[in-house]
Image (cartoon, rainbow, N blue to C red):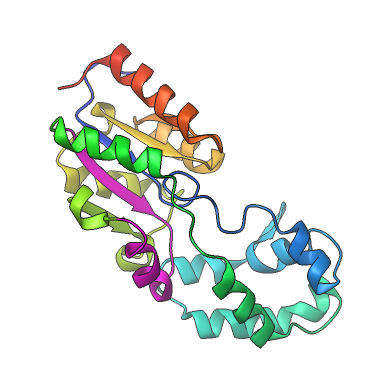
Amino acid sequence: MSSEPIEAVIFDFGGVISVPVFHDLDPVDDEFGVPRGSLNRLLFGGPDEANPDFHRLETGELSFADYLAGLERRAPEIIGRELDADAFTRFSATRGLQIQWPVVHRIRGLRDDGMKLALLTNNAKEFSDAWRASFPVLELFPVVIDSSEVGLRKPDQRIYELTCERVGTEPTAAVFLDDNEENIESARAVGLECIQVTPDPMVTIAELDEMLARRGTA
């Protein structure tokens, strides 16, 4: 692990700045009357089988409408019944973004201290306006890397290299915060110091501050 001072902090969006939108689908499975775990498998894939359409959605290769059509085709096999696409779309619209404001305030403090900042998110083009309007993105982040815009998604190591290149720092002089273990592992592989965050934003802030105190800042 590098011991050089930290020049940049890179934040994930969902699960770090916001509460994960789809962090617990068991109640939704119950509401739709399907076995628990079914919707998660349909949307994202199971433990041993990724949903390639979800990956293509997040790299901008597939529209949300085409992704939804794929869900409808796969639903009988995965959840044992047809998917009511209209009901699912209405449900998705009600899952509003919940911003973790203590994290946002800490980001503002880092900006005021002169820290280089970047936001790195896996997302879909169709959701861009919604999440960008949920907190002052452009005020806080000079660099925003959206997977659907750059055609790469975490955990592809190239997206971390691209982020550091646009920030203007080496990976070994940056720290990355994410809630996904696979993303953390791939980021570490390119030299980034990483913090795998928990649902508690105050713990996230404390871990970040401890790491910055340990490494120092440029």
Residue 126 part of the magenta segment: yes
Position in image of residue 114 (x %, y %)? 13, 33
Position in image of residue 117 (x %, y %)? 23, 41
Q: 25 or 124, which lies in front?
A: 25
Horizontal relation, residue 67 to residue 1: left or right = right
Q: 63 or 137, which lies in front?
A: 137
Residue 102 part of the magenta segment: no
| Residue at 38%, 59% in the rendered image | 152
Q: Quadrant of the N terminus?
A: top left
| Residue at 54%, 84% in the rendered image | 66
- Does residue 196 sit above or below 100 in this rendering? above
* Residue 99 at least partly seen: yes
Q: 159 or 112, which lies in front?
A: 112
Residue extent of the magenta highlight? 115-135
Position in image of residue 26 (x %, y %)? 77, 57
| Residue at 41%, 31% in the rendered image | 188
How many marks are shown on the rendered structure? 0
Q: Quadrant of the C terminus?
A: top left
Horizontal relation, residue 90 to residue 84: left or right = left
**Image quadrant assignment for residue 132:** bottom left
Position in image of residue 91 (x %, y %)? 64, 74
**Image quadrant assignment for residue 89:** bottom right
| Residue at 41%, 76% in the rendered image | 126
**Image quadrant assignment for residue 133:** bottom left
